[in-house]
Image (cartoon, rainbow, N blue to C red):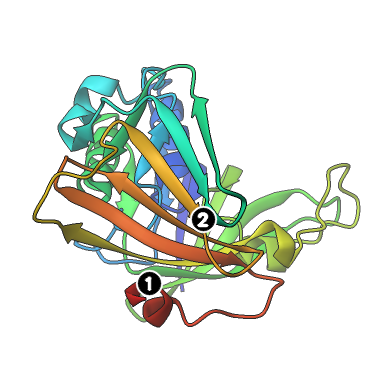
């Protein structure tokens, strides 16, 4: 078994993980991000294609490094259409909105963290946490390309998402924050990037429409006037939807 020692170990190479790691590395500390995907797929997730607060990125990875991933910065509001009630709600969003190429954005935040001096260990699957009797997490156990590895650190940051394995493995008995995560707080969704022959009616809005399910919704985010991110989802404590077939309809 190999042992890697760092000042900080971060789980997950997403937005939270990369910004946390870059911020710490800029202060001169040794940081590693452990990521289960390989180097080619890291940063590629099928969600998060629209950004609120796109004018307020921390300087650890400056906005200028990410802007090539922005495909539409002209969106400024949300449009909610409820045909069953013959209702349309137009809701302005303060600050800057942007629709993005999510794969390109993911690659650029990884590059930004790397430029700050962060190490990346890809193909690394976390399988346990190391925790003292007092409850402090001091490291991780993982499998990297078939090699069992232990990561020891002064600080461990969980940036692996809302259903991270770390939350299942860590003992939260003495915590002072809410750990009661419920399925009603999550949704299951499916989306595609679609080229349409004519410009969409609303290329300056994030458009949401109700489905025939009370806990379901459909959206499109305009990357450009003729390229849209379109999808739908449902609240995960409700009866499942056949998402692909529902989107086709």
Left/right of residue 181 with respect to residue 198 in the rendered view: right
Q: Secondary structure at mark 1?
A: helix
Q: Camera-side residue: 17 or 186?
A: 186
Question: Based on the displayed image, in which of its 4 quarters is residue 130 positioned?
Answer: bottom right
Question: Based on the displayed image, in which of its 4 quarters is residue 170 positioned?
Answer: bottom right
**In the rendering, at what x and y percent does residue 166 appear?**
63, 62
Mark 2 and mark 1: Cα distance apart in space: 28 Å
Q: Secondary structure at mark 2?
A: loop
Task: Say which residue label 1 marks.
Answer: 247
Of tags 2 and 1, the one toward the viewer is 1
Left/right of residue 132 with respect to residue 151 in the rendered view: right
What residue is rendered at 38% in x and 82% in y? 245
| Relative to 181, residue 33 above or below | above
Left/right of residue 48 with respect to residue 150 in the rendered view: left
The crowding category of the residue bearing disc 2, from other C-alpha atoms within 10 Å (few below 14, some 14 to 19, many at least 20), is many
Task: Say which residue label 2 marks.
Answer: 160
> Is disc 2 in contact with disc 1, using a CB cutoff of under 8 Å?
no
| Relative to 229, residue 41 above or below | below
């Amino acid at each position: 078994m190999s042992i890697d020692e760092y000042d900080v170990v971060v789980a997950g190479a997403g937005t939270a993980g990369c910004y946390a790691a870059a911020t710490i590395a800029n202060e001169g500390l040794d940081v590693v991000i452990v990521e289960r995907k390989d180097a080619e797929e890291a940063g590629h997730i099928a969600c998060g294609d629209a950004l609120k607060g796109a004018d307020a990125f921390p300087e650890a990875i400056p906005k200028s490094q990410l802007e090539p991933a922005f495909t539409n910065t002209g969106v400024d509001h949300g449009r909610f259409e409820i045909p069953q009630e013959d209702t349309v709600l137009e809701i302005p969003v303060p600050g800057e909105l942007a629709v993005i190429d999510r794969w390109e954005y993911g690659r650029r935040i990884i590059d930004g963290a790397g430029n700050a001096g962060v190490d990346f260990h890809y193909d690394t699957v976390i399988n346990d946490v190391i925790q003292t009797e007092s409850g402090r997490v001091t490291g991780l156990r993982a499998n990297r390309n078939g090699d069992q590895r232990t990561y020891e650190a002064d600080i461990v940051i969980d940036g692996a998402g809302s259903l991270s394995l770390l939350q299942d493995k860590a003992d939260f008995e003495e915590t002072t924050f809410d750990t009661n995560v419920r399925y009603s707080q999550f949704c299951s969704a499916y989306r595609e990037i679609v080229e349409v022959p004519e410009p969409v009616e609303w290329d300056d809005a994030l458009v949401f429409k109700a489905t025939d399910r009370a806990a379901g919704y459909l959206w499109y985010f305009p990357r450009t006037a003729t390229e849209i991110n379109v999808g739908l989802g449902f609240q995960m404590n409700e009866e499942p939807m056949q998402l692909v077939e529902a989107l086709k309809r």
